[in-house]
Every structure is written in structure tokens, then in C-alpha cells.
Amino acid sequence: MHRFVLTLLFLLLALLGWTQKVGLVLSGGAAKGIAHVGVLKALEENEIPIDYIVGTSMGGIIGGCYAAGMSPNQIEEIVLSKEFLLWVNGKLEEGHNYYFARKDDDASFLRLNLSLDSTFSILFNTSIVNDLSLNFALAETFAQPSAIAKNNFDSLFVPLRVVASDIFTQSEVILSKGSLSDALRATQTVPFFYNPIRIDGKYLFDGGVYNNFPVDVALKEFTPDVIIGSNVSSKIYKEYPYGEDEKLISRSLLYMLLDNSDPSEIPPSGIYIQPNILRYTSFDFAKARALIDSGYLQTIRQMEEIKQKINTRRTCESVAEARNKFNNKSAPLLVDHIQFDGFSRNQQKFINRFFNSGKRPLLFSEIKSGFYHLVSHDYFNNLYPGFVFNTQKQNFNFSLTKRPQNNFQVDFGGVIATRNISNIYLGMNYYYFNRTLTHFNANFNAGNFYKSAQVKARIDIPNRGQFYLEPIATFNKWDFLQGNDLVVKNFSPTVLFRIDRKIGVALGIPVGKNYKMTLEGSYLNNRDQYLNTDVLTSTDTLDVLRLSGSRAGVEFNSNTLNRKQYASTGKSYSFSVDWFGVVENYEPGNTSILTEPQSKYHSWMRAKVSLEQYFKKGIYSSGYIFEGVLSNQPVFTNYMGTIINATAFNPIQDSKTLLLQNFRAFNYVAGGWRNVFTIRKSLDFRLEGYLFKPFEAIGMSQTQEATLNGDLTKVYFAATAGLVLHSTVGPISLSVNYYDDRENELGVLLHVGFLLFNKTSME
């Protein structure tokens, strides 16, 4: 009887020309907020009008898209795209990774970002996720709708309110005007995850901190006749959830950061929708399809109730027509001017070089390319982009705002292993930015097996063609005698002590987006101490081989591998040509047949090519590695001195910690196949096999001299099998390794962390 009366009343009001105004409230919930897209789809398909929208956090993003003139299908396409996953995970869009600016890989797994100002105070950067891609995507998406509405949210396709938070006054902030992209970026600034942005001089955070389900804002700002509230936030338990607490504890951070959502705020005349998303977490962005479906299905289930309470209908055709009329008002996204906030004149000149500054107006694609080219340098990872509409010229200005810069970085890392190759890593980085961008770096490795110190300064100079100069000094020291194995009892370490020193300068030149050419000249000064036998006694004295001289070369390379070690996707390429001119000074020990010191001058050329590529399908990834070397390098005074300084093939992670004599040569081809099976997220099983074919194998004569054997039938084999867990402290790897080598044949290695070293003077 009640439903009949209510329906009759609605019909009577409709006949009198009265139409209801419907407000839609979308809660926060991070990834779970994607379910709101399904709610929008169901409402529009069933001709339910949406006259006002209020949103918080992800609800603000989804609601903002709809208010800006996007259809539910268009929003769905965005959240299902690969680009969306990159935005929310803090990764740059594919095709916009500029390899030229990439830093060399090191053993660090933790970076502490600091800002040292003129008074030497320290400012910590507390964000977890890089927001560069997200910020630019929002600026790109909402520049035109914001211009159409003249920065008034009431003039959007659907009037909108976005809720943010001021943590200093502990109050909500209702955004109704200004840049739409800024408002949407502010409302999803979850503390510690994203850096906050300033709006009207205030740092604002996620709206869910103080109002995660802003029904009250909708009632206050728009006074709608009916409210539809879609809530995807975490359930608040009236009693302790015994039996579920273990599963729920991992989400406790978001429970603390985001305010609860109270369904009772919906008036009796309204509709409360809560999609069934209990099995999803706030970080399940990859499950967008299922989340959309959950919102759609729940709304369809409640459609009868919705239609009973809302008498007004708005056909899909009329909505599409109104949407097109709104979007057709937009001006072309052309940029006439780049405006800066917080940069000196010299710094502006530097940045303008990235944007083809002599040409106006700039196409959006040119702005996007320039922006990503600029932020590929670590120093610029705190730039905030925006588009400001120029009403006089009917085009846009592109704005770059300088947020607090992290000009000082401290890196920590290292490796712990079952062989005595463990070490700790410390890196320090300082950036100075004026006419040029200078990156000062110093890093140190300390362990029983390996010690290192390196100092370098990269000076980036944007000109007609961008390039950098990089002076570098490196000290490496290896103690192979200390490389005992805690697992394999019969492990026989090599008696070898190496000191490797280099001072040089490199010139780097970009070649497109994905390649770099490096010209390098350096002075090297090395010392090797070794035995000519396999057994060390207390009375033995070591041979000493000193090399001093010059190296000059050119390298052409690229790298898109997904990890520093144990990659499973992407590819890398390197081709180099080097000239060496060195003086060999040899002093024999008591295990040498020779008795007199010798001095010789050697010069040679070397060409080297390396390829690595992976092909991924589902949980299986396969890849190949190829390496080839051609050289006219001469032999040194004796065999050990020659083999130590020959080019090495190191396909397995621990092979650089072993002197594999059968895998060194002046001329060779080598390759192998890698199989990677993803057992579960971040856990891989790897099975790899390699072949090494020297054109001239290095052998030892009866007089300890090096001989070159041109037997083309000789091929050496290496293999590894093991598990790798990719953790926050680097890879955790347990592997069984086999080498077709007389001294290091079979071994087991467990290591935690990145097993990486600074390049030697001959690499």
C-alpha cells in the first residue's frame, strides 16, 4: 500500500511538471573506488538522472571524470588501461622513459631523500609513490573541461564538489572552484603515499581523512531531492572481528588514515549502494574489471528501489547529446607559453631547452614529450605540471611548479651471502642546478671479498643537442682468497688479489629516447697479485703484475629490463669499441719459473656486443642472452697474468665473484637461454643454461706462458637453477650453479640483496 501511494504521488508530481534533483555521493576507497564506474554505468543505462556529484578520494576522481563530460564507458576504458596502472603505481608511461637520463645500477635498495637548503636544514620526503605520471595525466585529462567551466565546478557538465583535508586544522576542505585537476589530485593524497599539493597556499590531503562519505556536503551544497550514496570504504566493525583479524591487519594503515563511512547519513528518501568488494584490497588496481562489475551488479539489484524513489528519467540519447554539446566547447590543447613558479632565470632557460622553446604554439604531444624528458632526471621528480587557459589567445599556458626539491640523497644497500662475498653499500648524491644540472655521486662498498670507492660528477648541458660530461674516479679491490663457501665444503678459492684504479671522463649523447652513446677516455693503474699454482703455502710469495696506461672507447647501449638483477621482461643492448695502450710491469714470486722482472708495452683494440631480451606470456617468461668479443689483445708475461686480464663471460649472478678460467678469452661468442616461471607474485623459479665458445682458448705451457689454442670444437657449459624472491631489500636468491671449469665446478649460493659491483677499468 505504501509503495502504491508513493508511486501515485510521484506520478502526480510529474504531471505537474516537477522533476527531482538527484545528488550522487561517491566515497573514497583507493582501488575499491573503481566500483563507482559500474554504479555510473548502471544508473545511466537505466535513465536515472545525475544532477550533482560529490566525491572523496577515488570517488572524487571517478565523479570528476563524469562531471567533466566523460561517459561511463570512457571512464571504464581509462581505468582498464595499462597507463592507469602505471599512473597509480608511480611509473612513467611506456614510450616516455628516456634512457639517456638513467643512472647506473648499484647495490642500493633503500633511498633516503633529503633537501638541504641554504641554512643546511633537512627536509625529509615521506612519499612512497612517485606521482609524476599521475599529475601529468590529471592535468592532461581535465585541462579542457576546466577551461570550459572557467574553473567553476558548478559550470561543469555536472556540478561537482570535491572533498579534501587540511591536516593542520584537522578539518575538511570543500573544493568548488579552481583547477579541476588540482582538486582531484588533492583529494587522493593519502598521507605517506603521495606528496601533497598546495591549493590556495595550503597543503591538502585525501578527503577521506576527515570525511570519506560526504553525504552532508551534498545536502549542504546542493540540497538535492534524492541522494544516491555509493560506499566502497572499509567496513567499520562494531565488535572486534575475531577470526578475520589476521587477514584484516594488513589493511590497518588505511583504517587509521581514512575516516569511517557512516551509511546512516543517507536520508530515508535516499538510496544506499554498497558493492560486494570484501575480497578486494585498496591496492587491487589490477582487478579493475571485477571491481566495475561488482558496482554494476549491486546497482542493478537495487534498480527497482532506485526507480521507485526517483521519478525523473533522462534518456541515454539526451545525456549523450548534452555531453557532446559541453565537450564541443573546448579549445584545442595548444600551448603558447610555459610559465614557471619557483625557478630562477637560468633554471628557466635550462628547462625551456626541453620544450623546443623557439616554436609557438606547441602541440600537446611536444609538451608531453618535453615534460617526460625533463623528469627522467631524478632531480626533477618533484615538478608539478598544470595547464592554465589563456582566455585572450584561446589556448593554454603550461605551468611548472617547483615543489620542495630533494637535492640530497643517501642510498643504503648491500648483500648477505653464504659465500664470503657479503658487503654493505653506501651512496651519496647531491644535485646543483643553475645553468646546468650537476649530479655529484660518491659510493662505497665494504666487505671481505670486495671493497670499492667511486666519485663522479655528471654535468648535464642542454643545448641544441643535449649531452653530459662525467669525470669519474674509481677504486676497486678484490680478495678472492676470502671467497670461502659456507655450503660447499670442498670449495677451493683462487689465490688472487686485485686492485683496479681508473680516472677518466665520459661524454654522453642521447640517441633517440631509448639509446645512449658514450665516449670515454681514462687512465688506468691496476695491480694483480697471484700464485701460479693451486695451493698456497706459508712460504709462498706472489707474482705482481702492474698495468698502467690509457683507454679510449665508444659505447652504444640501451636498457629496458624491469629489474637490476633477475629480470623477466624488457631488453638490453650494448655495443662498444675500445683501444688500450698499457705498460705491463711484472715481478715474479717464488711460484714463477721466471726469476727476473719484465716490462712490456701492449696496445690492442676490442669490439664487444651484448644482447639480452625476454618474451613473457602469462606466468612464463623466456629470454636469451648473447655476447661476442673480437680483439687483437696480446698475451702477457705468463698465463695467470694473461687469463686474469682477458675478457670474461659472466652470465650467472655470482660468476663475477669467481675466476672462471674457461670462461675468459680474447675472442669468443657466448649465449644462453633463460626460463622464468612465476610461482606467485614476486616469487620466480629460474632455469638457465649457457654455452661459451672461445675462438682461441687461453692455455698454459710447461713454462707457465700463455698459449692460444684455435681448436674450434671446444665449448664450455654453465647452468643455474633456483628460486628468487623479489623483496624490498632486493632479490633473495637460492641457486645451484654449475660451471664447466676445473676449479669452480658446482656450488650453492644463497644471497639477499643486489650482487652488483662498480665497473672495472677494462669493462
Image (cartoon, helix red, strand yellow):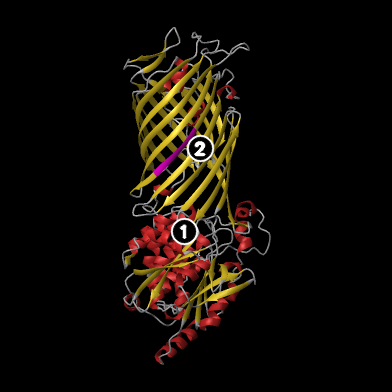
Q: Secondary structure at mark 2?
A: strand
Q: Pointers 1 and 2 in contact (CB under 8 A)?
A: no
Return the residue nearer the eye: 523 or 488. 523
Whether 186 is drawn above or below 447: the answer is below
Return the residue nearer the eye: 695 or 275. 695
Q: Specify whether 497 is left or right of 523.
A: right
Q: Which residue is mark 1?
A: 132
Which residues are drawn in magenta? Answer: 502-507
Q: Specify whether 488 is left or right of 372.
A: right
Magenta span main SS? strand
Q: Is any part of residue 756 visible from this angle? A: no
Tell which tag, 1 or 2, sits nearer the viewer: 2
Mark carried by residue 473: 2
Q: Position of residue 3 (x, y in %)?
A: 49, 81
> Label 2 is placed on what type of residue?
Ala
Return the residue nearer the eye: 684 or 590. 590
